[in-house]
Amino acid sequence: MPLTEQTGPFIQSASLPGVINLGLGQPSPRLLPIAAFAEAANRQLHAGTDPLLMQYGAQLGHPGFRVSLAHLLTDQYSHLVTAEELMLTGGNSIGLTLVSEVFARHGDIVICEDPTYFLACGVFASAGLEVRGVPVDADGLDVDALARMLAGGLRPAFVYCIPAFQNPCGVCLSPERAQRLVELAEAHDFMIVADEPYVLLHYADQRPGSLMRHDQGRGRVISLGSFSKLLGPGLRLGWAHAAPAVIDRLAQHGAIRSGGCLNPVVAHLVWPMLDDGVLLAHVAELRSVYGERSRALTAALRERLPEARFIAPQGGYFCWVELGEDTAALLERADNVRFIPGSRCAVERDLGRFVRLSFSFYEVEELVEGIERLAALRGG
Amino acid sequence: MPLTEQTGPFIQSASLPGVINLGLGQPSPRLLPIAAFAEAANRQLHAGTDPLLMQYGAQLGHPGFRVSLAHLLTDQYSHLVTAEELMLTGGNSIGLTLVSEVFARHGDIVICEDPTYFLACGVFASAGLEVRGVPVDADGLDVDALARMLAGGLRPAFVYCIPAFQNPCGVCLSPERAQRLVELAEAHDFMIVADEPYVLLHYADQRPGSLMRHDQGRGRVISLGSFSKLLGPGLRLGWAHAAPAVIDRLAQHGAIRSGGCLNPVVAHLVWPMLDDGVLLAHVAELRSVYGERSRALTAALRERLPEARFIAPQGGYFCWVELGEDTAALLERADNVRFIPGSRCAVERDLGRFVRLSFSFYEVEELVEGIERLAALRGG
């Protein structure tokens, strides 16, 4: 049963022979820790495993797993995370569906960073929510602009943001802005849904931590974390981290009340990796490899596309580059290199002169070659 | 890492010492095939497993898995099921969330059998849908009553039904009614969401098959199937079975476009069980055990509660019993036996004189003892 057919949402473009697709927001296959996962899973699964593993899982997830996760996050975030603040999910995409149904109603407004993770908007659209954009700069979401929108009468159900190594901009929300954002949420009665899959993937001095540090018991922030970028996206395992009262509301979603935890078996299989250091050792490797890749990409950009403007990312998967020309048209002319044109990530702004480049999928040499091709395409 | 803490939505009530909880709609731990699952999973997971298992999974699920599932369903349903008609889900509860967002809009009406699976209504409520009820009798959903509601101007987004061994009534939709239901869907432009976790759990002559047999390419039926009742609920693995154009709409849900298949790893782990006969051998055991339990339950009812009225179920998990008194009040007086009072399963009707009894969780002796206690409670 070969898995090579198992094509992800974007893998097919990647597998076009001879094409370097810098649009791919996923890890390279060699960075998927299949051997370590198999070892952990085999340790957990045997004829004597408690059959209750196959019973409905607790709505919040296994209490012991949540304690292990709380320890890991406390260590990594440098602030206390308790098991009571955690609920397992089936990854951040379905997590956004749950959050949309619990904390918004059809027709409500969601404010997103502009540009944002383009596929999140599709989740909100499926839930019948209306998306509005607020600009992003080097310090993340422009909280002043948001404050003006709120002062103008806009009443969002929630603000959706990616505070750590934003997709696509690669920037982090400054602590001052984070603080102000939470205060605005209190003053104007909205929630903040922080999509935080990259928070532990830092490669330099910038270590943003989770937005939950600024919630301080207010119950305004829901941080959606995921094992997708720490182990592998196919696991479909993530978590919501929020004040216990917020977690309780999320756990009352009809699908959770009916079916229990969204992925208790996979949680059980990866559990040893949280406790025995295997997950953190893997994250350390990711930091090393992705850090090198991000530096190689930005060095190649500086050398081959000196007119390109960008903020060198210190974490995450992405670099957001202003090329100063219509990048959707550029993509149409491309045959051996691909990328996400800025227009795809735009909510309301005209961002057609930007591209999102990912450095997660390819090796250094391929990234450099990809930038060579991009430069040749622009010159051509 | 003991799993005994891992309490499902209802397990805690079960674990009250000395109480027989006939409300539990889940398999007994001894019927969860943990050893067989562990063996299959260990076969699938090793250091040499394709790392793409951990990459985003294809939106519809692995094509090869869908072929295996199509073969299994073709064999069991006695009509052709193709892989193109199948999409994997994370179980029927989250499947109902996807269906609700794709095929209805906030404020739309969903017609449910009355009584119905009570937790499904919570899924619809989370999606902002309004639930209306249509009666059920010995032949399933009362299609004449539905036709009258439609003639009266009711415009549902979809009809939610459990055509095979209905929860809680244990009855099956007759082929004539099924045919008429699909024709009504065409005439009045609504979808039919068939929740079919029990379709293969038949214990006597009644073998209803899937409602999809009556769709005949019309694209009106979505059958939600699940491994929850065939292997174990904790797997959180199910499927949608519908015309390819309907499957395509479902796959365009924002969360699927963003995150791919909802549970590709668990699908990969159970895959061998579909091909090597282990799943069907287990289902054969379930038919034998549950058949014996259902007959013991109904025999005990006839003996100990001769005034109780019920239709002896020929499959599924449940028996719907008219006791002729307020069963919610009865439950309040109970200390060593529990059940789901009919009012809990009611949508709009007054069903307070009924109880839902499940025969899936307990052994024959416990079921008989449970009925003894129920009889004593009524007499007391």
Image (tube, coloured by chain):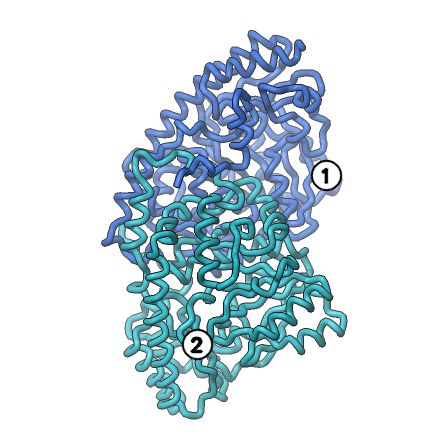
Chain colours: A blue, B cyan
Decide which of A259, A244 is in the foreground and name it: A259
One can see residue A55 in this view? yes
One can see residue A223 in this view? no
- Judged from the image, the secondary structure of the residue bearing numbered disc 1 is helix
Numbered label attached to residue B81: none
Q: Residues within 10 Å of mark 1 (few under 14, many from 20)?
A: few
Left or right: where does residue A356 sit relative to residue A82? right
**Residue at image location 63% in from the left, 50% down from the top:** B245
Q: Disc 1 marks which amino acid?
A: Ala
Decide which of B151, B373 is in the foreground and name it: B151
Decide which of A248, B227 is in the foreground and name it: B227
Q: Chain of mark 1?
A: A
User: Which residue is under mark 1?
Assistant: A151
Q: How many marks?
A: 2
Decide which of B86, B293 is in the foreground and name it: B86
**Residue at image location 25% in from the left, 50% down from the top:** A46
Question: Relative to A6, does residue A299 appear above or below in the rendering?
Answer: above
Could you say where residue B28 lies in the image, as x and y percent from the top left? 33, 66
User: Which residue is under mark 2?
Assistant: B205
Question: Relative to B73, does residue B264 appear above or below in the rendering?
Answer: above
